[in-house]
Amino acid sequence: MSAPGSEGKGAALTAWWEAAGEGRLLVERCRTCMSTQHYPRGFCTSCASREVEQVPASGNATLYSFTEIHRSPTPAFTAPYVIGLVRLEEGPMLMCRVVPGPDGGVACDLRGTVAWTDIEGRQLLRFVPTGSPATDYLPLLED
Amino acid sequence: VNGAAIVGVAESTLGVTDMSILDLQSEAILRALDDCGLGLQDVDGLATTGLASKFADGVVAEYLGIMPTWMDSTNIGGASFELFLARATRAIECGDANVVVISYGSNQRSMRTRGLVSAEASEAYLPLNQLEVPYGPLLPISAYALTAQRHMHEFGTKPEHLAEVAVAAREWARLNPVAYRYESGPLTVDDVLSSPMISSPLRSLDCCLVTDGGGAVVLTSRERAKGLRRTPVAVTGFGAVTTHRSVGQMPDLVSTGAAISSARAYEMAKIGPHEIDVFQVYDSFTITVLLTLEALGLCGRGESGEFVADGRIRPGGSLALNTSGGGLSYTHPGMLGIFLIIEAVRQLRGEAGKRQVSNPETALCHGTGGYFNTHATAILAVDR
């Protein structure tokens, strides 16, 4: 697993991707006002302080919303699959792949964990609901 | 008399045209100038943007053979044209321009490019490209789908409520001879719910059309407008806001910046939402309409599903909304914003034929760009 090349990504995001390459998920925290943000900018969007640092996220998260995609944007993606927005317990929101929960379904406000994984050769964040037996995505809806 | 008024409006040929972007756009501009009786030699301001080209103002000015001394080619997606109304009004008020043309054209349907193709896709610095595109969202649909899913979860909004927006749009389009779906027959809620799922909960009939089309709007001072052919339509209020770019950075998935842009517009026009006769709001997707109705203050937060469920937004209902048939059933050549203005003006002039609302005096146009990224609201009034 390797992070995408850093060319032109910006200093803060390059550091974030380097950690991702080691399987670590970071969020950016402000030492001045203690706000936590994602994505990292190198300054705080709450108080404009440059005293920020990237710290590990626990991975604990809640699924805020999701969508099952039946028509992929390019042939590189094999539909169907589910993407979602999860809120990390540290506060920030981020996009990830989603696998079904214990009952085989996906619903808003499911709790679970988000971690880096390799999906079809891409390094992606994946949200796994608590108690989910699933390691791969199964279609939710018949169409 | 201070301020600016819309004096000419026109569409180009719409649908599947096999015309170029500039053919569509110049056809619309010449028709809009004919509408008010002005000529190209009168035009000293040009506001235009598009999908295909940088220097959109230069491309269009050159094609028309004019040299405008005031120009704007800001691209904030489908909201650009409501923003141009605000900018043009200010320019005319302060004397920077006398006659402004706002224009748009796209041959997206003939060229078979649904996506808003741009260099943006290859720009690595964009957080959107690093943090969201790799997950395979079908943009823009998936961004809107995420808002719809959350709205359904939080407020009990049903797929049937989303479908009602598409059904109402079709009913209006069946009254509009230039609408793409004019002769397509009625649509039922079941038709929408049985159409192919694209990005849940949005199905293909929750999504706008892909068509060709151009449009143009001509503005001048309210003073000069009095001597022209048509009933002038004054621009009485406007507001805009940009809130984010990536959908994951949207401050709240179920409330949009339309609340901010419309609040400014209402204040300027000294009018409230319940006093306005006609609404033309961007309907890229059915959920776009529901969230916008709430943000404009026509119903409460979370109430939009139930609000539309009684047929209120169909022809004959109590809310005259998207009377052209909108992006869902009339036309959607990549960006709808200019067509919202054209339809509002036609309604205010009493020129809307079978779909004419009874004696409207005021209208609101609301443009939405990107993934609820940018919002621009404009309020119009018959200027007698």
Image (spheres, coloured by chain):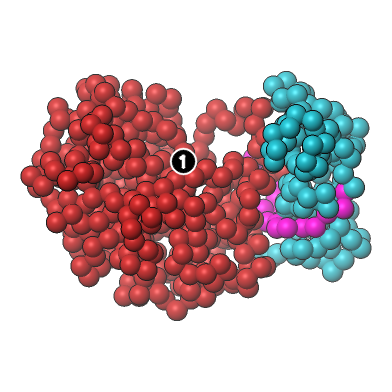
Chain colours: A cyan, B red
Image position of B77 with respect to A42: above or below: below
Residue plotted at (62% across, 48% down): B250
Is label 1 in a helix, a strand or a loop?
loop
Image position of B273 with respect to B261: above or below: below
> Which percent across, then down, holds residue B108?
42, 40
Residue plotted at (38% across, 38% down): B106
Q: Does the magenta run of residues contain A71? A: yes
Image position of A32 with respect to A89: above or below: above
Residue placed most toward the observer, B99 or B195: B99
Q: Does the magenta run of residues contain B291? A: no
> Which percent across, then down, holds residue B376?
43, 47
* Residue A93 visible somewhere in the drawing: yes
Image position of A67 with respect to A92: above or below: below
Q: Which residues are magenta?
A: A59-80
User: In this image, B172 relative to B219: left or right?
Assistant: right
Residue placed most toward the observer, B51 or B266: B266
Residue plotted at (33% across, 67% down): B275
Q: How many marks?
A: 1
Give the residue pinned by disc 1. B77
Task: Please state which amino acid type lies under the numbered disc 1.
Answer: Gly
Q: Quadrant of the N terminus of chain A?
A: top right
> Which percent across, then down, holds residue A105?
79, 65
* Residue A76 visible somewhere in the drawing: no
